[in-house]
Image (cartoon, rainbow, N blue to C red):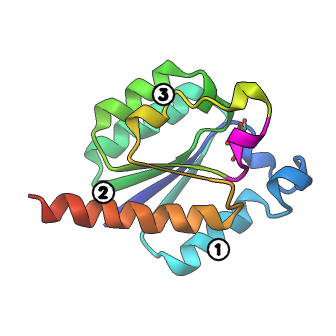
Amino acid sequence: MRILLANGPNLSQLGHRSPDVYGTASISDIVAAVKRVHDDVDDFVTEYEGALIERLHRARTDGTAAVVVNAGALTHYSYALRDAIELIELPTVEVHLSQIAAREPFRHHSVISAVVDVTITGAGAYGYELAVLAARQLVAARHGAD
Ligand code: DQA
């Protein structure tokens, strides 16, 4: 089983970016920690909305069983991303390092939450591991229901 771990804009800057909010681990540190525990994770990092959407489209047909996505600020306004998540029809977990509900008002709403299965916020880097665990459960539940 392959799980896609996709990160959107500005997450490549973790470590340097607002460490008080996001912690000091880089995206490579976070991905490496996840892969130490889960050897079936494929990671993808991009600054581009279209590249993220194209990667999700590929996930529909490349054997990916589930998706974990931190879409960065696209979370709050990208209806194109929302539509992509909806159309691939894969179990999907939305993850945010920070507790977005406790931050600036524009971060309170996620336009993708309505089309994902699980949302994990505020657990920092560990949230990614929780998200992969949740993705695994979603796949098991979906297959159990087949
Ligand atoms: C984020 C929260 C978003 O509001 C922000 O734009 C990010 C990171 C998080 O992981 O907490 O880029 O998704």
**SS class of the residue under badge 1?**
helix
For residue 116, side relative to residue 98 (left or right): left
Q: Amino acid at mark 3?
A: Leu
Q: Amino acid at mark 2?
A: Ala
Which mark sits nearer the N-terminus, 3 or 2? Answer: 2
Q: Amino acid at mark 1?
A: Ala
The stretch of residues the image draws in magenta is 97-103
**SS class of the residue under badge 2?**
strand
In terms of image quadrants, where is residue 75? Answer: top right
* Foreground pick, 36 / 92: 92
User: Which residue matches tag 3?
Assistant: 81
**SS class of the residue under badge 3?**
helix
Displayed-image quarter of ligand 1: top right
In the orientation shown, which residue stands out farthest toward the bottom? 37
Image quadrant in which the C terminus is located? bottom left
**Tag of residue 61:** none
What is the C-alpha distance between the residues marked 3 and 1?
Answer: 26 Å
Within 10 Å of disc 1 (Cα), the crowding (few <14, some 14-19, many 20+) is some
Do the residues under discs 3 and 2 have CB atoms within 8 angstroms? no
User: Which residue matches tag 1?
Assistant: 33
What is the C-alpha distance between the residues marked 3 and 2?
Answer: 19 Å
Which mark sits nearer the N-terminus, 3 or 1? Answer: 1
User: Which residue matches tag 2?
Assistant: 65
What is the C-alpha distance between the residues marked 2 and 1?
Answer: 20 Å
Residue ID at (57%, 31%): 110
Residue ID at (59%, 62%): 128
Residue 13 x, y percent position in the rendering: 81, 47
Residue 125 x, y percent position in the rendering: 69, 63
Within 10 Å of disc 2 (Cα), the crowding (few <14, some 14-19, many 20+) is many
